[in-house]
């Protein structure tokens, strides 16, 4: 036996290691999974271990690899413990990923048409149309930050929101059916980044701007940057009952044009406040065109930028008291009002910061400086005392800049290029290090620190990641009660991790096991993401979600979450002509459409009402019409009405695009369009 064999023998003959990995202690994600057979533990004596040893040797797997595989493998039918809602960047969609298996479960069309669910190909058009800008269709988005709805600072599994950085839009997704219900276009801004984040009871969805421009984006020359360009943060009021943002109760705050970056809501002790960071206090304005440094240098000259500290409760009261001015039809509290009324404060933050993350107890705000090896931890209590003592100097817009030393609790040297911070249930914080690249783990002194062996602000360990990590996402890691256990490192570069597929390389989501304390974190899975470039994600315990299996009633409209009065009904299928308008009432059930052929005349205005009358889980039908750019996914009970002009005569075979039954191929019909006379 070689040394390697001896190692193997030692590992594989410890029964606990392998028996444990098949074990049934993991939550299996709701009622469906209980039908899945729970693996029996071990059994069979030494033979399975010998087989495992053979496979491991043939494939060159180390004992660590085997443990990682055992921690992430889901036997067929076993459900994941967590769901991760991830942006897919300029894919404009949302990804739903099971953890720990890292399997993609859903791709939700949000700002971008998505043909599988018919999003923009017959369904969802009204929602996509809400996202028009200057009357133009905008059919992509740059999704950055998903935000699950919260109750008392904890994910409640009801809704998810996400922003479009490219166009300053926000979307609402209903987690009963995982479909996008609303897109709001910010009337003030064309660029957002500090969204979506929610306040602890989802009263407001926060959308902070990014690149300054005149509010409402009217033209102003670069020379007027300081006088006319502005930043903003918008507070969108969310109405849980309707599942929609109520634009009539939403308002914005005018901010200096400092390129606001990310926002986070206070919680518990800091509830009622919001915090943001910014990265261009230099007001670099012309990108080097007139001999000044280009933005990357121009916006990085000063040692400090400003964390924004905003008293949301006060801002809300001012808005309700009618203190907002109206810009582009939208209420905006001016900088002057915010200063006069003590709503807005700044605190210096080290060089070119990225992100601000509020600790689970709400007592601390963590900011990373991209060009500074520290994370800076601010104390909410100290900030309040500094405000009370008026220990500040105004900036050039008159906003009080609080004394740095009076607000800081700790600075921890974590490594190169710190970006984003998440939290666990053991009193640790985790910060992504873009430049190293690694994820650092450090102890949160303060109340959570009581659980630590070392209640201190100390770096305790790092795990290298591959490569260039941006955000990290720990299980419920930005709530009032993080779960620990898993952390996903969302890496921008993959380089050598996957089989080459051309010059455009997938991003790499690495699952990190953070269950053990100390310097023991391990990467246990690499997941390529070959869509857009995800930024943030949030991970929720799967059993908090209560999605529908079928729509509650036949004739259901996902757009309104109610029965459509004009839905096609079983037994009442027909084609009705009224002048040149033709209403088709069609039902779909395994394995036929009724009616199976439909005749129209060139130029007719067609309203095609189609209902899937199935009540069986997973009995989805599609509806695809060639040459008319139509494809629907009709889940059980779903009704859609699509309108189009039959502008070309011809013979169009339509069909069901979901393989729904043995006779799925027969589930078709003809749409006949007679030439106009
Ligand atoms: S951002 Cu992309 S890595 Cu938009 Cu939150 Cu930091
Ligand atoms: Cu219905 Cu295929």
Image (tube, helix red, strand yellow):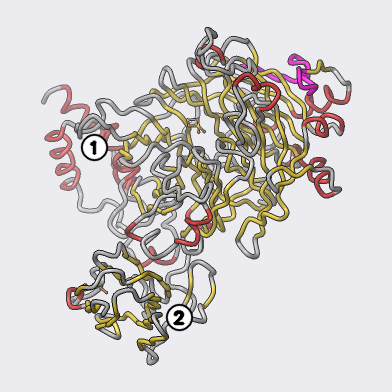
Q: Residue at x 39, y 48 (%)?
A: 97
Mark 2 neighbour class, 10 Å CA radius: few under 14, some 14 to 19, many 20 or more: many
Q: Quadrant of residue 309?
A: top right
Q: Residue furthest top?
A: 291
Mark 1 neighbour class, 10 Å CA radius: few under 14, some 14 to 19, many 20 or more: many
User: Which residue is the site of mark 2?
Assistant: 567
How many numbered discs sit on the rendered protein?
A: 2
Q: Would residue 668 be found to the left or right of residue 467 on screen?
A: left
User: Which residue is the site of mark 1?
Assistant: 12
Q: Quadrant of residue 594?
A: bottom left
Q: Residue furthest right?
A: 389
Give how far across and how far down residue 531 sits, in percent.
Answer: 33, 42
Q: Quadrant of ligand 2?
A: bottom left
Segment colored magenta: 395-412
Q: Residue furthest front?
A: 677
Give how far across and how far down residue 616 sits, in percent.
Answer: 36, 77
- Residue 591 versus residue 328 in the image, above or below: below
The quadrant of the rendering that contains the N terminus is top left
The quadrant of the rendering that contains the C terminus is bottom left
Q: CA distance from mark 2 to mark 1?
A: 61 Å
Q: Do callouts 2 and 1 mark residues in contact (Cβ within 8 Å)?
A: no
Q: Give the mark toward the camera: 2 or 1.
A: 2
Disc 1, SS: helix
- Considering depth in this image, is 432 or 533 the residue closer to the camera? 533
Q: Would residue 227 be found to the left or right of residue 62 on screen?
A: right
Residue 622 visible to the viewer: no
Asked if the residue at label 2 sits under 8 Å from ligand 2, the reply is no
- Residue 432 versus residue 657 in the image, above or below: above
User: Between disc 2 and disc 1, whose residue precedes?
Assistant: 1
Residue 668 visible to the viewer: yes
136 part of magenta stretch: no
């Amino acid at each position: 036996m070689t040394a390697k064999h001896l190692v193997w023998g030692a590992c594989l003959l410890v029964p606990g290691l392998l028996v444990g990995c098949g074990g049934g202690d993991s939550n299996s994600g709701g009622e469906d999974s209980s039908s899945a057979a729970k693996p029996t533990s071990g059994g069979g004596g030494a033979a399975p271990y010998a087989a495992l040893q053979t496979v491991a040797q043939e494939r060159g797997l180390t004992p660590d690899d085997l443990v990682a595989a055992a921690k992430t493998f889901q036997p067929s039918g076993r459900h994941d413990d967590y769901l991760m809602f991830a942006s897919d960047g300029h894919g404009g969609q949302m990804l739903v990923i099971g953890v720990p298996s890292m399997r993609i479960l859903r791709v939700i069309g949000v700002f971008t048409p998505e043909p599988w669910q018919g999003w923009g190909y017959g369904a969802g058009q009204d929602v996509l149309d809400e996202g028009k800008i200057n009357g133009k269709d905008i059919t992509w988005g740059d999704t950055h930050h998903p935000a699950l709805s919260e109750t008392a600072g904890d994910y409640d599994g009801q809704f998810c929101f996400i922003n479009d950085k490219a166009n300053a839009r926000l979307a609402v997704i209903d987690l009963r059916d995982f479909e996008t219900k609303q897109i709001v276009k910010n009337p003030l801004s064309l660029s957002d980044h500090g969204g979506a984040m929610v306040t602890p009871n989802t009263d407001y969805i926060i959308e902070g701007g990014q690149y300054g421009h005149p509010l409402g984006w009217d033209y102003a020359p670069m020379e007027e940057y300081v006088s006319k360009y502005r930043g903003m943060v918008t507070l969108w009021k969310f109405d849980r009952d309707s599942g929609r943002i109520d634009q009539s109760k939403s308002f914005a705050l005018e901010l200096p044009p400092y390129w606001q970056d990310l926002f986070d809501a206070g919680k518990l002790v800091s509830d009622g406040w919001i915090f943001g960071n910014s990265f261009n206090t230099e007001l670099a304005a012309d990108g080097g065109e007139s001999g000044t440094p280009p933005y990357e240098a121009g916006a990085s000259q000063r040692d400090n930028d400003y964390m924004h500290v905003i008293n949301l409760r006060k801002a809300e009261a001012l808005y309700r008291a009618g203190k907002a001015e109206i810009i582009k039809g939208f209420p905006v509290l001016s900088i002057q009002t915010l200063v006069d009324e003590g709503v807005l404060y700044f605190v210096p933050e080290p060089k070119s910061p990225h992100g601000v993350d509020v600790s689970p107890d709400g007592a601390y705000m963590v900011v990373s400086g991209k060009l500074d090896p520290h994370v800076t931890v601010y104390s909410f209590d100290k900030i309040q005392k500094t405000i009370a003592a008026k220990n500040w100097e105004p900036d050039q817009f008159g906003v009080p800049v609080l004394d740095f030393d009076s607000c800081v609790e700790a600075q921890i040297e974590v490594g190169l290029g710190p970006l984003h911070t998440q939290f666990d249930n053991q009193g640790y914080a985790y910060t992504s290090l873009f430049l190293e690249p690694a994820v650092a783990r450090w102890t949160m002194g303060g109340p959570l620190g009581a659980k630590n062996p070392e209640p201190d602000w100390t770096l305790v360990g790092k795990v290298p990641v591959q490569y260039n990590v941006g955000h990290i996402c720990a299980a419920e890691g930005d709530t009032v009660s993080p779960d620990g256990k898993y952390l996903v490192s969302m890496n921008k570069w993959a380089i050598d991790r996957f089989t080459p597929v051309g010059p455009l390389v997938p991003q790499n989501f690495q699952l990190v096991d953070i269950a053990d304390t100390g310097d023991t974190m391990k990467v246990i899975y690499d997941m390529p993401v070959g869509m857009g470039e995800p930024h943030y994600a949030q991970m929720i315990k799967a059993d908090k979600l209560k999605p529908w299996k079928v729509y509650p009633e036949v004739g259901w409209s996902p757009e309104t979450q109610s029965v459509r009065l004009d839905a096609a009904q079983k037994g009442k299928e027909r084609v009705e002509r009224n002048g040149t308008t033709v209403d088709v009432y069609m039902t779909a059930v395994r394995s036929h459409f009724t009616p199976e052929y439909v005749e129209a005349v060139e130029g007719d205005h067609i309203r095609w009402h189609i209902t899937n009358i199935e009540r069986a889980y997973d009995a989805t039908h599609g509806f695809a019409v060639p040459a008319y750019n139509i494809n629907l996914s009709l889940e059980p009970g779903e009704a859609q009405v699509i309108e189009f002009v039959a502008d070309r005569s011809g013979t169009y075979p339509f069909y069901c695009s979901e393989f729904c039954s043995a006779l799925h191929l027969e589930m078709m019909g003809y749409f006949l369009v007679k030439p106009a006379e």
